[in-house]
Image: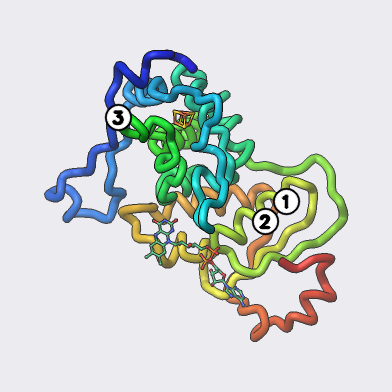
Amino acid sequence: MGDPQGFLKYERKNPEERPPKMRINDWEELYIEMEKDELRIQAARCMNCGTPFCHSGILINNMVSGCPLNNLIPEWNDLAYRNLWREAYERLIETNSFPEFTGRVCPAPCEKACVNNLVKDPVSIKSIEYYIIEEAFKNGWVEEDKPSYSTGKKVAVVGSGPAGLSCAWELNRYGHEVTVFEKNEYPGGLLTYGIPNMKLDKKIAKRRIELMGKSGIQFKTNVNVGKDYPVQKLKEEFDAVT
Ligand SMILES: Cc1cc2nc3c(=O)[nH]c(=O)nc-3n(C[C@H](O)[C@H](O)[C@H](O)COP(=O)(O)OP(=O)(O)OC[C@H]3O[C@@H](n4cnc5c(N)ncnc54)[C@H](O)[C@@H]3O)c2cc1C
Ligand code: SF4
């Protein structure tokens, strides 16, 4: 915990929305990125609770409370406060394959579970996450992830929404040869064809998909598995299908 009194001294601040008169001229994202020093102050509001519910991801009455990815939130809050953005990025990707998506569109159950809610407003966890990953992209820390070895196993992933993409990304990191099949013309699932630009600009999904290609993951688009490509054939050609 960077500043033990931070949660008493500072108020929560949310990112500002771009003025409507500007927004009617384009399809760009809604929020204005917060300044680094402002986010460091927001990170100082984290109490580093002994029992940090923000990252617990437990089910209460069948509903998730806290981060379902078990993101190490108090740890990267502290690193952000101390201006150690690269370390914060490395801690963030320990649990989260694509923070650039969650930092934009996740409904942030971590913030609902934040202990600061009991007396004040929650820590701005989502804004801090967003800043960490965008800082990482700006500084070239997010690199293609080519494994140094191969298991010799071939895996087919059907569907290239966030579920398929993260599955492919992690399997590739473990040295498997991964091919993603997608029935649409372009990968991304609802990241590409559903969520509006003002929430998640298409270039954000494109940036990650290109990185995946450079990391060795193959994409076969315009292929509807079960229709254009028999499932039995897929099972014969690949060691695993998911
Ligand atoms: C307008 C809109 C706004 C949203 N906003 C948010 C938000 O703010 N926050 C949030 O958390 N969620 C949001 N969502 C929901 C989010 O997009 C979905 O929960 C998420 O995309 C689900 O991921 P998925 O990978 O499971 O499925 P999808 O994204 O649906 O991906 C499945 C992919 O599989 C492909 N596929 C299916 N069958 C086959 C086949 N037989 N062969 C080949 N390919 C196949 C499909 O074409 C598709 O590309 C929004 C959704 C919409 C529509
Ligand atoms: S619950 Fe809130 S205050 Fe406590 S560690 Fe998590 S983010 Fe920090």
Residue labelled with disc 3 = 12
Mark 1 element type: helix
- Amino acid identity at mark 2: Ala
From the Cβ of disc 2, is ligand 1 less than 8 Å away? no
Give me the disc on residue 172: 1
Sequence-earlier tag: 3 or 1:
3
Mark 2 element type: helix
Residue drawn at x 36%, y 35% is 117
- Amino acid identity at mark 3: Arg
Residue 17, given in percent of the width and then of the height, sits at 23, 43
Residue 141 appears anywhere in the view: no
Find residue 154 and report its image quarter. Answer: bottom right
Please name whichever residue, 2 or 119, is drawn nearer the observer in this view of the structure.
119
Residue drawn at x 51%, y 27% is 74
208 lies above or below 55:
below
190 lies above or below 74:
below
Question: In this image, 45 relative to 174: left or right?
Answer: left
Mark 3 element type: loop
- Amino acid identity at mark 1: Asn
CA distance for labels 1 and 2: 6 Å
CA distance for labels 3 and 1: 39 Å
Please name whichever residue, 8 or 86, is drawn nearer the observer in this view of the structure.
8
Residue labelled with disc 2 = 168
Sequence-earlier tag: 3 or 2:
3
